[in-house]
Image (spheres, grey):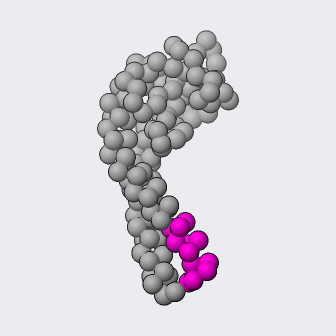
């Protein structure tokens, strides 16, 4: 369990910032998805015909993939630095370590939600979300 624990109100104060953060990384998520798709298709074509142009293009794709990955990592680190646990990036899904009835739980927020309205046991995951 993470060292920091949040009350519902404390978690709620982070929601506008989280929404903005995930809005800002949305183009990088899309870019990474497109580049990875292009890279997989190119690798498939290279199996049968690995010409120089294909290798050059693969090098370019690798650089662009790394750039997108770097942007995503920085955004996710900024979330983690606040003690918030990143569980997914598409859609954005985070957990706030908390206490409920004397036990450790996670307050759960998913991209698109405006309130902290759900929680789950630490071993239950998203499928175990329950309304607060």
Determine the residue positioned at 53% across, 67% down.
41
Asked whether 45 falls inside the magenta stretch, the response is yes
Q: Nearer the viewer, residue 57 or 107?
A: 57
Tell me where residue 89 appears, x and y as whole percent.
48, 43
The residue lying furthest to the bottom in this view is 52
Q: Where, by quadrant of the figure, is residue 46 drawn?
A: bottom right
Q: Is residue 106 left or right of residue 12?
A: right
Tell me where residue 122 appears, x and y as whole percent.
64, 28
Determine the residue positioned at 63% across, 23% down.
128
Determine the residue positioned at 52% across, 31% down.
95
Tell me where residue 71 appears, x and y as whole percent.
39, 56
Which residues fall within the magenta stretch? 39-50
Tell me where residue 112 appears, x and y as whole percent.
39, 30
Residue 96 visible, this angle: no
Question: What is the chief secondary structure element of the magenta stretch?
Answer: helix
Asked whether 118 falls inside the magenta stretch, the response is no
Q: Where, by quadrant of the figure, is residue 40 drawn?
A: bottom right
Determine the residue positioned at 59% across, 71% down.
44
Residue 121 visible, this angle: yes
Q: Where, by quadrant of the figure, is residue 16 drawn?
A: top left
Q: Nearer the viewer, residue 124 or 98?
A: 124
Q: Is residue 72 left or right of residue 16?
A: right
Depicted 52 relative to depicted 84: above or below: below
């Amino acid at each position: 369990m993470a060292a920091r624990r949040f009350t519902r109100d404390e978690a709620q104060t982070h929601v506008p910032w989280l929404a903005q953060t995930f809005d800002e990384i949305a183009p990088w998520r899309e870019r990474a998805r497109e580049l990875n798709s292009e890279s997989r298709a190119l690798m498939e074509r290279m199996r049968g015909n690995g010409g120089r142009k294909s290798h050059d293009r693969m090098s370019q794709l690798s650089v662009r993939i790394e750039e997108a990955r770097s942007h995503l990592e920085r955004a996710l680190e900024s979330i983690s630095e606040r003690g918030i646990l990143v569980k997914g990036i598409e859609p954005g899904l985070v957990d706030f370590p908390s206490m409920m009835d004397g036990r450790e739980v996670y307050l759960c927020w998913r991209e698109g939600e405006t309130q902290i309205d759900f929680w789950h046991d630490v071993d239950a995951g998203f499928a175990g979300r329950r309304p607060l």
